[in-house]
Amino acid sequence: MTDQRQPIIVLGASRDDPADEEPRQDGEDSPRPLPPAFPPRQPVANATGTRLADSAPAPSAPSPWRRLLSSLIVVAVVLTGSALIKSFVVQTFEIPSASMEPTLVNGDRVAVTMYDSKDVRRGDIIVFRDPDSWLNTTDPTGLKGAMRGLFIAIGLLPEGSGHHLIKRVIGMPGDHVVADGQGGLTVNGVQIHEPYLRPGTSPSTTPFDVVVPEGCVWVMGDNRSNSADSRFHTSDAHGGAVPLTDVVGVAKRIVWPFAHWGTLAGGREAFKDVPAADPAAAPVREDAPAGMARAA
């Protein structure tokens, strides 16, 4: 039977139009449809003829007041963090003299842990506030004083900087400490051998015989021939002793310079055989105790 269908002519279609192609038989691949093409988006102009993309306001720079506020916030955070560290963790101090040689030399910086007075023991190296004007120092004024105050505020210098000393604890409250002036040093009747002293150095050529008052410690520098310590302040208000309330902390480590880096432990070993003091023997400390130190 003859097929009587007539071809359909599509007006306006080109030979490349898929509609002009003959239907494909089953099993033949259909052409993959192409994604629609869109012209590139053009900037839209406003009524004045200016493109909207060009008319968007540029981000404004922060005002001077905003910058000042940001700076103040940063300073406040730094000061708060520094105060917390100084109050509860650790603080550094610079060694100002040769009185603790050879253990510490002039210019060393030590890390001092903030302390509870129960942590202080014989043999510890402590930093303490000048109890009775041992140091003849005056605070700077003018620009130097202002800079010093700033450094104290941010933690680069300690409170009362210039009015601190560093010595070794020799006697605790109630201890009977005696130097015979011939090189012998005893605490509660036990002879003390101090390995941290410079070889050949006498424990003390200055004789003294003291009972450390309640709430105080007796301190001496490791460089015994060049240390103005408790031995030379027996006529002061505290009789040469240092109130525990004036102790800032215990020096634990040398942190600067790196060549001297190391711990300051081991001093307690020299006193390990010393018996505990008789609490009844400790004079009751007053503002200006009299008769605490008995010169030999």
Image (spheres, grey):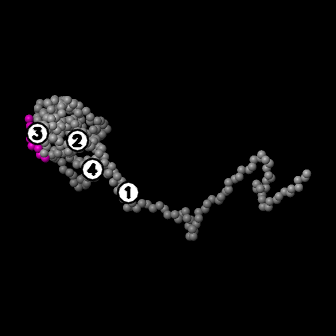
Q: Position of residue 168 (x, y in %)?
A: 20, 37
Contact between marks 4 and 3 (CB within 8 A): the answer is no
Per the model, the C-alpha gap separating discs 1 and 2 is 40 Å
- Within 10 Å of disc 3 (Cα), the crowding (few <14, some 14-19, many 20+) is many
Write down the residue under mark 2. 117
Q: Nearer the viewer, mark 1 or mark 2?
A: 2
First reached walking from the N terminus: tag 2 or tag 4: 2
Q: Position of residue 4 (x, y in %)?
A: 88, 55
Instruction: Residue 226: tell me if it is visible.
Output: no
Per the model, the C-alpha gap separating discs 4 and 1 is 23 Å
Contact between marks 1 and 2 (CB within 8 A): the answer is no
Secondary element at image label 2: helix
Residue drawn where x is 26% and y is 36% of the image: 264
Per the model, the C-alpha gap separating discs 2 and 4 is 24 Å
User: 260 or 215, which is in the foreground?
Assistant: 215
Q: Nearer the viewer, mark 2 or mark 4?
A: 2
The C terminus lies in quadrant: top left
The reply, left or right, for residue 73 in relation to residue 235 is right
Type of amino acid under label 4: Ile
**Numbered badge on residue 220:** none
**Numbered badge on residue 293:** 3
Q: Is residue 80 above or below residue 168?
A: below
Write down the residue under mark 1. 70
Per the model, the C-alpha gap separating discs 4 and 3 is 36 Å
Span colored in magenta: 287-296
